[in-house]
Image (spheres, rainbow, N blue to C red):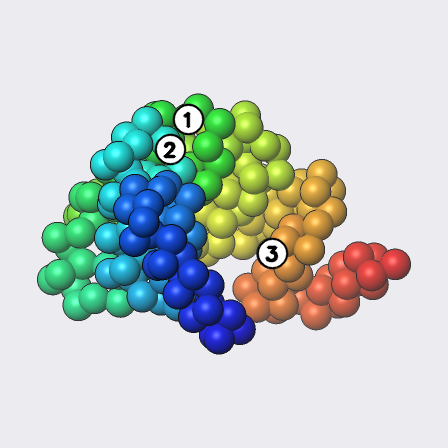
Amino acid sequence: MQRKYNDAEKVFNEHLKSHPNHSKTLEYLGDIAGYQKKWDEAITNYKKLKNSFPKVANYWYKYGGALGMKAKESNKFKALGMIDEVEESFLTAAKLDAKHVESRWALVMLYIELPGIIGGSEKKAQKYANELMILSKVDGYLAKGYIDVYSKRYVKAEINYKKAHEIGNSKTTFEKLYDLYLNNLKDKAKANKLKEQFEK
């Protein structure tokens, strides 16, 4: 897989020499760098994109995502200095595109995981979970379940994950509920029953 990325990277870099602002090429290079956890490279490519195309929500989202991943791997002091820009990028993406699911998910996760002292807030997280609910019921219930798990409200999380699974019945909804039963609620019987039903 790594070799495939390296080969693709070479091709895209060659193309970029003759077409320095080709948006798709820059995006692919950003994506490849992201997959390889080369956050600085990903940030550079996405930054060019969001600056050249400031109205494209996805570029803001991807830029914020790469920046957020770099912040997670940085020391706390350095990460603190990056949080505002991460938040602003996701907020801009959400504002630019009222149907942009990924940026709303990113905001749910950001606000629930950040300590209150630096802008974290369950209220803000719930606001974007509610917006997701309007765009996609499955995502809405999954987001609310995610918030509940993070806040250790496992019984409430089960209700939300069950609703998500009833509607979506996908690998993702199954895994979230299964994981909750197994790791949080420590209920093997429910986990096994769910697995049997899903594999039918």
Marks 1/2: CA–CA distance: 6 Å
Q: Is residue 180 left or right of residue 131?
A: right
Q: In 3D space, how far apart are the residues under numbered discs 1 and 3 (Cα atoms)?
A: 27 Å
Q: Secondary structure at mark 2?
A: helix
Q: Nearer the viewer, mark 2 or mark 3?
A: 2
- Left or right of 184 in this view: 55: left
Residue at image coords 43%, 61%: 11
Q: Which residue is mark 2?
A: 57
Decide: marks 1, 2 in contact (CB < 8 A)? yes
- How many numbered discs, if any? 3
Q: Which residue is mark 1?
A: 97
Q: Position of residue 10 (x, y in %)?
A: 39, 65
* Residue appearing at x 30%, y 42% in the figure: 21
Q: Are marks 1 and 3 in contact (CB under 8 Å)?
A: no
The residue identified by callout 3 is 176
Seen from the viewer's position, the closer of residues 35 and 190 is: 35
Q: In the image as oriented, which residue stretches furthest toward the front?
A: 18
Q: Amino acid at mark 3?
A: Lys
Mark 3 surroundings: few (<14), some (14-19) or many (≥20) residues within 10 A: some
- Position in image of residue 61 (x %, y %): 36, 41
| Three-letter code, disc 2 | Ala
Question: Can you tell which of label 1 and label 3 is closer to the viewer?
Answer: 1
Query: Hey, what amino acid is under mark 1?
Result: Asp
Residue shown at the point (69%, 46%) measured from the top left = 165
Image quadrant in which the C terminus is located: bottom right
